[in-house]
Image (cartoon, grey):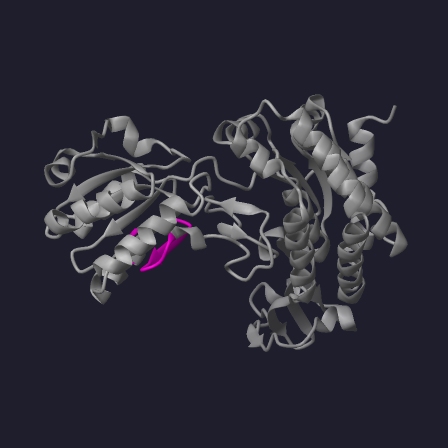
Amino acid sequence: MTSIRERLTELRKACPALSSSSAEARNALLEEIARGLEADRKEIFNANEKDLENAKDLSQAVRSRLRFNEDKLQSVTDSLRDVASLEDPVGKVLMREELDSGLLLEKISVPIGVIGMIFEARPDALVQIASLCLKSGNCLVLKGGKEACLTNRALYESIVRSSLKCGFGGWIELLETHEDVNQMLKSEGLIDLLIPRGSNAFVRYVMQNTTIPVLGHADGLCTMYIDRDADFSKAVTCALDAKTNYPGACNSIENMLVHADIAPAFVPLMVQSFEKAGVTVTGDEKCRQYAPCTPATDADWDTEYLDLKISIKVVDSIEQAVSFIAQHTSHHTDAIITENRTAERYFMEHVDSASVFCNCSTRFADGFRFGLGAEVGISTSKIHARGPVGLEGLMTTRFLLQGNAHTAGTYMGKNARQFTHRMLETGSPSQILKG
């Protein structure tokens, strides 16, 4: 039986062909994959029904993520075509500089190499990450949750058939056992980047058990601050969407901060609106002076509920709000509701999160909504990609230097020749590769 390392070694061999393929060829394959999934819908849905039957004892939330029906199929095929329509990220000239006459330097975008994605019961995530990896010229190894094993296999086999039809073999691999995960985590040198998607505990396990770089986030502790100059109608509308649109999402709010000057009028309105929407409210002592609710504990401010529950705290100033966020945030997404431009700028400049919003729901922190076509996940890291990660987050860079018998010694010593370091336009394709 072929070992995981052997399979990953073969996968890695496919990297040069994929990374050097034309945008037209990759886009044609994306369209072929969409058509293939549509043609294979019966097999995919049958596999999903079996997965759902096997998962009948799991929570409704898990079964909802697991379900792959006509709506999910339409969503992923639309996403495949959206990704195909995006600008090619491979080989973009990010910088072009003349170091000296005849000595040309370019910095270009290139694929990372082999992406390892480990995800739980979300079959649609398999197609999303596959589309972005293909578009960006990256090879991909996938490991999905056991709950979706049959659906994942059906999706994977459809993608492989489409790939072979278009002359792209060996760029994608599916792993299926729990032991495979441990082997992936030990595959430094074969996998260049790991992307885990799932529960906090799952993502933390991946981060703590590998030396491979990991892109993602473990927590989604998002806060909405209602400023003293907020429009109450906007605040209620945005807060309800941020909490109730999809409570289990990492970009839903868990904490709300309300300026003390408006708290007597706003807190009762907000609590009533939350409770009417089925949201359980906990609050600090000042909050409970204006509306009855459960007392908030110290642990509440650091809890990602992923449910219809929220904690409200009254603060004396925007500075106190920013300080609270700095202490309790997971650096995912935080928002301010205000009509005061000075307050807006202060909040956006001082809150150190991947996404910082004003007068809108935190639920907009999403690759599709940002126009990225799809996303491989959301990163709270400050290294490499941050926020919703689309094609750009799957790219790295390479320097190309072209000379004509230039030597470093020429630019050293008493009579050293001087560099020109003249920046050139980057709008055209690589002059070095074109030549």
Question: Is 360 covered by the magenta stretch?
Answer: yes
User: Which image quadrant for residue 51?
Assistant: top right
Question: Is 420 covered by the magenta stretch?
Answer: no
What residue is at 33 percent from the left and 49 percent from the top? Answer: 240
User: Which image quadrant for residue 291?
Assistant: top left
The vertical placement of 102 against 72, above or below, is below
- Residue 95 in picture, x, y percent from top left: 59, 68
The vertical placement of 295 against 339, above or below, is above
- Residue 215 in picture, x, y percent from top left: 55, 42
Query: 85 left or right of 354?
Result: right
Q: So how many labels did they put on this image?
A: 0
- Residue 54 in picture, x, y percent from top left: 68, 25
What residue is at 53 percent from the left and 31 percent from the top? Answer: 60
For residue 434, say whether it is visible.
yes
The vertical placement of 72 against 5, above or below, is below
Query: 330 left or right of 389?
Result: left
Q: Nearer the viewer, residue 352 or 241?
A: 241
Task: Tell me the quarter of the image containing the C terminus.
Answer: bottom right
- Residue 134 in picture, x, y percent from top left: 73, 53
Magenta residues span 349-361
Q: Nearer the viewer, residue 5 or 62?
A: 62
What residue is at 35 percent from the left and 58 percent from the top? Answer: 360
User: Which image quadrant for residue 282?
Assistant: top left
Query: 326 left or right of 102?
Result: left
